[in-house]
Image (tube, helix red, strand yellow):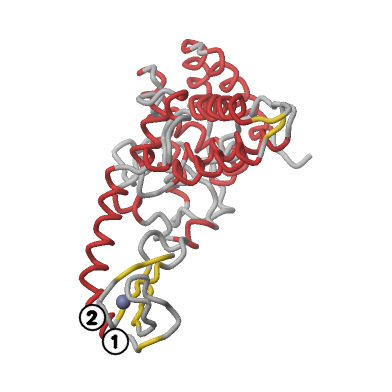
């Protein structure tokens, strides 16, 4: 009997809320949220039930009454938790107190700042190990942390791919879990339909999903993720996207900036390089060259080697 009554009550309520959300029954959600607002919470309770994250996500619910109630509940819980634990990472404190604070403080909210998008690991280990309370800003979401269950395809590889897509779509997102899951499921189904062989996931299928995963989760490309989640891009259209199509305006600008930086550095770098006979000039067939290597794209891609022929000045590059 590891769980207390309160914990079980809250989990039951969560289950009912999930059902109501699946059915899209707003009035039922509202009445359940009313019950939920009467709970007195502790950090431990919120962590065990993962209820903080769950309600936090409902703040963006399309029904304004639901989102308002979710906001109120989160605010009240935050106040309860903050009041009794000086540090929000305290994990064992328990409290019975009721909260009346409504004017207080911290920013749970949720919409990541540009700085966070660019550097989500900024606070790194300190947040990674802290318990999930409503004061956590969601950064990485998975089917499991969102308490979702995918509708299994009967194939482990495919199911795993749906989970990956969910994680990518949910990265730094405040979208509803249902929406993420439905998009992930539908992208997977579309790719599978196109690239399955003998009704099994093919190599191309896997590589396509991997490409989608990387691009959707790209921290420098939030626009792509949002466009897919919000439906600005239809799933069928998205599934036709090439890597080029997926590169956002930001990503393109970044690539350009790197290229310009490289060109600026090239002269200096070139002069520092000793000669080598490792390369053969395609123009004059000479072997007297200088070379340097540089990161031209993201850090996980191979270096590009720039070679200059000392004899004729011909330049080329390869990676
Ligand atoms: Zn040459």
Can residue 308 be seen in this snapshot? no
Drawn side of residue 30 relative to residue 247, left or right: right
Q: Are marks 1 and 2 in contact (CB under 8 Å)?
A: yes
Please provide percent x and percent y for residue 213. Answer: 51, 42
| Quarter of the figure with the N terminus | top right
Give the class, few, some or many, for how many residues have Cα within 10 Å of label 2's Cα (few <14, many ≥20).
few
Q: Secondary structure at mark 1?
A: helix
Q: Is residue 157 above or below residue 31?
A: below
Q: Residue at x 28, y 83 (%)?
A: 311
Drawn side of residue 137 relative to residue 194, left or right: left
Please provide percent x and percent y for residue 75. Answer: 39, 36
Q: Which residue is mark 1?
A: 272
Can residue 191 be seen in this snapshot? yes
Give the class, few, some or many, for how many residues have Cα within 10 Å of label 1's Cα (few <14, many ≥20).
few
Q: Residue furthest right?
A: 1
Residue 268's mark? 2
Q: Is residue 302 above or below residue 180?
A: below
| Quarter of the figure with the C terminus | bottom left
Q: Residue at x 25, y 85 (%)?
A: 271
Q: Quadrant of residue 306?
A: bottom left
| Nearer to the camera, 60 or 251 | 251
Q: Is residue 204 above or below residue 117?
A: above
Q: CA distance from mark 1 to mark 2?
A: 7 Å
Please provide percent x and percent y for residue 130. Answer: 53, 55
Q: Secondary structure at mark 2?
A: helix
| Nearer to the camera, 40 or 242 | 242
Please provide percent x and percent y for residue 101. Answer: 35, 38
| Nearer to the camera, 191 or 229 | 191
Drawn side of residue 132 relative to residue 258, left or right: right
Drawn side of residue 182 relative to residue 272, left or right: right
Q: Quadrant of ligand 1?
A: bottom left
């Amino acid at each position: 009997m590891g769980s207390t009554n309160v914990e079980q009550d809250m989990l039951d309520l969560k289950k009912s809320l999930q059902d109501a959300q699946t059915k899209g029954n707003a009035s039922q959600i509202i009445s359940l949220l009313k019950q939920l607002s009467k709970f007195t919470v502790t950090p431990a309770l919120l962590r065990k039930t993962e209820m903080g994250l769950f309600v936090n996500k409902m703040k963006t619910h399309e029904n304004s009454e639901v989102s308002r109630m979710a906001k109120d509940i989160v605010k009240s819980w935050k106040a309860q938790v903050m009041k009794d634990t000086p540090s929000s990472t305290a994990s064992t404190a328990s409290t019975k107190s009721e909260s009346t604070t409504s004017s207080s403080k911290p920013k749970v909210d949720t919409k990541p700042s540009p700085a966070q998008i660019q550097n989500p690991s900024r606070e790194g280990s300190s947040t990674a190990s802290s318990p999930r309370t409503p004061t956590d800003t969601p950064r990485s979401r998975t089917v499991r942390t969102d308490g979702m269950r995918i509708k299994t395809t009967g194939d482990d590889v495919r199911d795993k791919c749906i989970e990956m897509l969910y994680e990518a779509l949910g990265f730094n997102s405040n979208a509803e879990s249902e929406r993420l899951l439905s998009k992930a499921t539908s992208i997977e189904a579309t790719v599978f339909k196109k690239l399955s062989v003998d009704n099994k996931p093919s190599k191309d299928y896997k590589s396509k999903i991997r490409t989608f995963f990387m691009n959707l989760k790209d921290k420098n490309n939030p626009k792509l993720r949002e466009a897919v989640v919000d439906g600005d891009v239809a799933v069928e259209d998205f599934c036709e996207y090439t890597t080029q199509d997926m590169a956002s305006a930001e990503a393109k600008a970044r690539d350009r900036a790197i290229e310009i930086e490289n060109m600026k550095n090239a002269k200096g770098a070139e002069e520092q390089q000793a000669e080598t006979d490792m390369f053969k000039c395609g123009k004059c067939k000479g072997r007297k060259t200088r070379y340097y290597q540089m990161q031209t794209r993201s850090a996980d891609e191979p270096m590009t080697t720039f070679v200059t022929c000392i004899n004729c000045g011909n330049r080329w590059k390869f990676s």
